[in-house]
């Protein structure tokens, strides 16, 4: 279901309770989906291909079977990683809609290989550029896996993300 609110052009991450819970992508040039939990827009000089807005009404299933249980919750975190990876491909900017009644609240951590450093990304506060990160981890909200760590190897960053949620290299 889509509200008639005007929003920016980009891709929304939408949680649906159907099919055992699923995450959908909704490419929109202005309509904001009622159950959106995240959004990304292309960075400067980049644009989303026109067919993405037209094909299947702009809707595309990202991942399903995400409701209930730890293994399904891990799929939910994986869906967030895939969503952010797509944004990175467009040098995009991502925002998470806080206090959403759908899905699970998450924290997103970015990783810069050159600095061997993890950065907590406050996606609740506004659009964050994800193009400068080499890896991403999505963990349950308020998880302390990365708190207080100043230097961390790429492998340990990924392993920690996989232990508590999901992590992936962005390329």
Image (cartoon, rainbow, N blue to C red):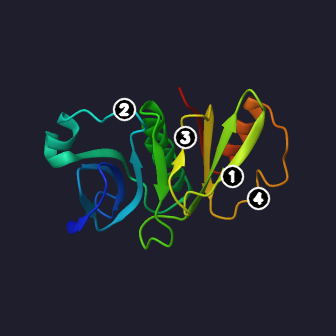
Residue 71 vs residue 74, the one in the foreground: 74
Badge 2 local density, few (<14 within 10 Å), some, or many (20+)? few
Where is mark 2, residue-wise? 46
Badge 1 local density, few (<14 within 10 Å), some, or many (20+)? some
Quarter the N terminus occupies: bottom left
| Circles 3 and 4 in contact, beta carbons < 8 Å | no
Q: Name the mark on residue 144.
A: 4
Badge 4 local density, few (<14 within 10 Å), some, or many (20+)? few
Q: Nearer the viewer, mark 2 or mark 3?
A: 2
Q: Position of residue 72 (x, y in %)?
A: 48, 54
Between discs 1 and 4, the one toward the N terminus: 1
Badge 3 local density, few (<14 within 10 Å), some, or many (20+)? many
| Circles 2 and 1 in contact, beta carbons < 8 Å | no
- The residue at the point 84 percent across, 47 percent down is 149
On screen, residue 98 above or below 64: below
| Circles 3 and 1 in contact, beta carbons < 8 Å | no
The image quadrant of residue 7 is bottom left
On screen, residue 140 above or below 75: below
Q: Nearer the viewer, mark 3 or mark 4?
A: 3
Between discs 3 and 1, the one toward the N terminus: 1
Instruction: Give how far apart the Cα atoms at labels 3 and 4 are.
Output: 21 Å
On screen, residue 86 above or below 6: above
Between discs 2 and 4, the one toward the N terminus: 2
Residue 144 vs residue 18, the one in the foreground: 144
Where is mark 3, residue-wise? 130
Instruction: Give how far apart the Cα atoms at labels 2 and 4 are.
Output: 35 Å
Q: Position of residue 6 (x, y in %)?
A: 25, 63
- The residue at the point 33 percent across, 64 percent down is 17
| Circles 1 and 4 in contact, beta carbons < 8 Å | no
Instruction: Give how far apart the Cα atoms at labels 2 and 1 are.
Output: 25 Å
Q: Nearer the viewer, mark 1 or mark 4?
A: 1
């Amino acid at each position: 279901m889509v509200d008639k609110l005007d929003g920016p052009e980009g891709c929304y991450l939408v949680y649906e309770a159907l099919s055992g819970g699923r995450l959908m992508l909704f490419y929109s040039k202005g309509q904001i989906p009622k159950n959106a939990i995240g959004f990304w827009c292309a960075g400067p000089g980049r644009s989303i291909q026109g067919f993405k807005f037209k094909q299947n009404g702009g809707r595309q299933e990202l991942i399903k079977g995400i409701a209930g249980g730890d293994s399904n919750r891990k799929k939910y975190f994986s869906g967030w990683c895939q969503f952010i990876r797509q944004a990175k491909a467009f040098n995009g900017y991502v925002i998470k809609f806080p206090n959403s009644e759908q899905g699970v609240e998450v924290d997103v951590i970015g990783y810069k290989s050159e600095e061997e450093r993890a950065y907590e990304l406050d996606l609740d506060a506004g659009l964050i550029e994800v193009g400068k990160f080499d890896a991403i981890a999505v963990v349950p909200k308020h998880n302390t896996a990365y708190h207080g760590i100043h230097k961390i190897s790429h492998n340990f960053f990924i392993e920690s993300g996989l232990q508590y949620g999901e992590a992936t290299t962005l390329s």
